[in-house]
Image (cartoon, rainbow, N blue to C red):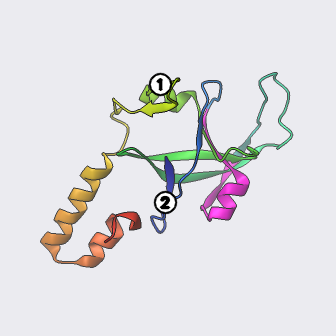
Amino acid sequence: MGPEKLENHEGVAVKVLLDSGATGLFMDMTFAKEKGFKMEKLKNPLLVRNMDGTANVGGTIMHQVECNMFFKGHVERVRMDVCNLGKIEVILGMPWLAAHNPEIDWKKGEVKMTWYPPICGKRKQEVKEQAVKRAEEDEDEEVLRKLVPKKFWK
């Protein structure tokens, strides 16, 4: 699984924590800065609470990151709240889990996407095929480079 920057389509592989107790989608502040994700300041900061209801020592959430999220042929545009997650880079919480309802094989440690909600983008291969078709029609390699992430270039 990996987020991709919108500005340059640079993808970053990450280990993601699927957390049914989390109330949103989150990216670690240090990770976001190190990888150069564009952070947007929130108009209204969000207070972060721990499971026991106490305020998180990391403070309030002040920024969000908008990115494309790729996972085994699936792609979608997401917004993640940026906060201090420690060793975890990305958390996909209950809103994402409920929308996608992935199949999880706990013994094998595998996650399968067998259903794609209408709110999501198209599958990666479909996006690539559409970009190639447009580029061939326009005979414009620059269009292809703008639409297809760098990892698909030959």
| Residue 97: x %, y % from top left | 50, 28
- SS class, disc 2: loop
Look at label 2 and name its amino acid.
Gly
Q: Is 64 drawn above or below residue 144 in the view shown?
A: above
> Dot 2: few (<14), some (14–19), or many (≥20) neighbours within 10 Å?
many
- Residue 64, compared with residue 17, is above or below; it is below
The amino acid on which the numbered mark 1 sits, given as a three-letter code, is Asp
Q: Residue at x 34, y 33 (%)?
A: 116
Quadrant in the picture for residue 15: top right
N-terminal label among 1 and 2: 2
Q: Which residue is mark 1?
A: 105
Q: Nearer the viewer, residue 132 or 117?
A: 132
Residue 50 placement (x, y as % from top left) = 79, 29
Q: Quadrant of the C terminus?
A: bottom left
20 to the left or right of 50 = left
Residue 17, magenta (yes or no): no
State the residue position of label 2: 11
Task: In the rendered structure, find residue 119 and report the number of the disc placed on it.
Answer: none
Instruction: Please identify, in this view, whether the residue under mark 1 or under mark 2 is nearer the observer.
Output: 1
Q: Using the image, determine if residue 126 lies above or below residue 134.
A: above
Residue at position x 63%, y 29% in the image: 23
Residue 153, image x and y in percent? 33, 69
Residue drawn at the location 15% of the way across and 71% of the way down: 136
Give the image location of residue 127, x and y in percent: 28, 54
Residue 120's image quarter?
top left
Question: Which segment did they paint magenta?
Answer: 24-43
Gap in angstroms between the C-alphas marked 1 and 2: 26 Å
